[in-house]
Image (cartoon, rainbow, N blue to C red):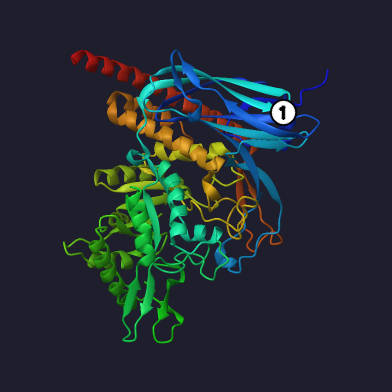
Amino acid sequence: MRESLLNGTIVESGLHYSRESYEALREIHKDKDYLWAWKNDKALSEIVLLSGDKPLNDIHICTSDFVKGTECIPSTCIKTFFVKEVKGFIGHAGWYAYNKAGIMPTGPREMFPDVLWEDTVCSMPALSIQSIWIEIQVPEDVSAGIYEGRVEVHCEENKLSFDYQLEVLEAVLPTPEHYLFDVEYWQHPYNLAEYYQLEPFSKAHLEKLKEHMQCYQALGGQTITASIVEEAWGGQTYSQNPIHYPSMIKWIRKKDGTFSFDYTHFDKWVALNLELGLLQQVVCYSMMPWESKILYKDEISGEQKVLIADVGDPKNYQAVWRPFLKDFVKHIEAKGWFEYVCIGFDERHQMEVALDLVDEVKNSKGKSMKKVAAFNDFVGNKKVSDQLSHVSVGLEEIRQNVEAFKVEVMNRKKLGRKTTLYTATEHFPNSFVKSIPVESYWTIMYAGSLGTDGFLRWAFDAWVENPLQDTTHASFQAGDCFLIYPDCRWSVRLAKLDEGVRDMNKLYVMAKKCPELEGPIKALLNQVKCQYDYDEVETPPTWAVAGRSAKWAREESKIEMLKDMQKIKEGIYAISKQYSNQEVLSLKIKKNSI
């Protein structure tokens, strides 16, 4: 009997599926699934297609309405994506400090399914696989209950049908701007200008940024990244321009030796995000740039020159930065932005000098600017930690002091201070292109298990030259520097982070509104493991400039993590059912009292 030209199965969305999975996937025949969600939430599913012994063209997806009696979730709420593969170097490229020339690693690259491509049709080579990502967006105004729908895949005379039941619970997920657990993904607006070949902060650039930042907003992002010096991070982001991450504020030394400051780009950037209703805070980097360099334009010569202001020489440091701070505070106060704008630091030593100077400079009401930082020495340097309104601590540092970190989070909450977790290069689990998707979901679950206020990652969009083809970076693991692709195409990694953020907000909402559920929620989150076994892939000098190792999940760890997170997801569902029943009771009582 001739084998079908096209086969397919529903799979777990927490794993990667590549050509090497072909034979194993042939043994799976799942064409039905049961999903659940809150109102104003999403339910995710993934289907993998397998072609037969000939290439296939014109593969397209059809979705039905999801129906419950006379009610429905319309098919327009069901989004489908073909998952596109991109290349990625499988080692660790080293550090920018050892590779300022940006020499790309020459070692092996592999293909990873990561780009969610919202396209109408696709083609498949013979004996290949193609993943389809499905998002069911549940409107807030639908009634609770079980909805039934279908996803069909058509190709020539072939048709595959996948039947779904979606249980909508009597619970409403807050809109992203009201999340109790939020995200901060550092943005790189100049990177967009370079990629699309647009004049920075021109009308065309601002239009592109608007669409881009709306994607960030939908994820729960409220914190905006801004630059106040050229190369705040020493040029480690990719760019073909001489300055990789320009300053939004231009420093100009006038003929009399004093400085003036051009806020044109900064003002446009803040105004754009304010228009979107996105501003919670604008974090400005940095008063402690790498190598302590400040680039400025000399008004006499017209040339760009360098000024060194190192905290190791406090008197000189203060003499350079005090005039800027005074002018900056005056500017943002006049704009009505003083409450939003913060000074940011990233893992710097001797922050005390800079923080004390920020505290010294006051606005007309006697207030100093807020200070935030990625700061890891929360145990040994309490003075710095206490000066920061928002602190983010790295995964590895937290693991070394888990109980102390939990206490720190709790104490800071009592004082109205925010504490988040961040992951970075060399951390495991993580959200690189080679990382399996469930690692992203685990990251949020672990952050929430510690009681944090959210999750931070560098970066949202620091793209390499051709991110839709090759995600390899000269200094970091592939995919480390961006979670979203050009034209607002999400990565699978980002979608799984977002799933985790939505689920964590469910737990935070339930704990806040129903104190009797705090115990079960705490017990569930206590099941989130701190670490999984991994292999270290050494990076020989022939592969890259600096031989650092990359950490990747072992095969047994992948399955273990997937099963663990399935149990956590099941636990969230069970607690949500209890919460939903209470919400139903509350609605009945409210209705009867009217």
Q: Which residue is mark 1?
A: 24
Q: Residue at x 42, y 41 (%)?
A: 218
Q: Residue at x 51, y 42 (%)?
A: 494
Residue 394 at x, y = what percent? 45, 50
Q: Within the image, what quadrant is residue 359 found in?
A: bottom left
Residue at the far right in the pictured view? 1
Amino acid type indicated by mark 1 = Ala
On screen, residue 594 versus residue 446, left or right, reads left
Q: Is residue 188 above or below residue 419?
A: below
Quadrant assignment for the C terminus: top left
Residue 562 at x, y = what percent? 56, 31
Quick check: can you spot residue 394? no
Q: Is residue 367 above or below residue 561?
A: below
Q: Is residue 275 above or below residue 81?
A: below
Q: Within the image, what quadrant is residue 139 found in?
A: top left
On screen, residue 383 versus residue 532, left or right, reads left
Query: In front: 368, or 73?
Result: 73
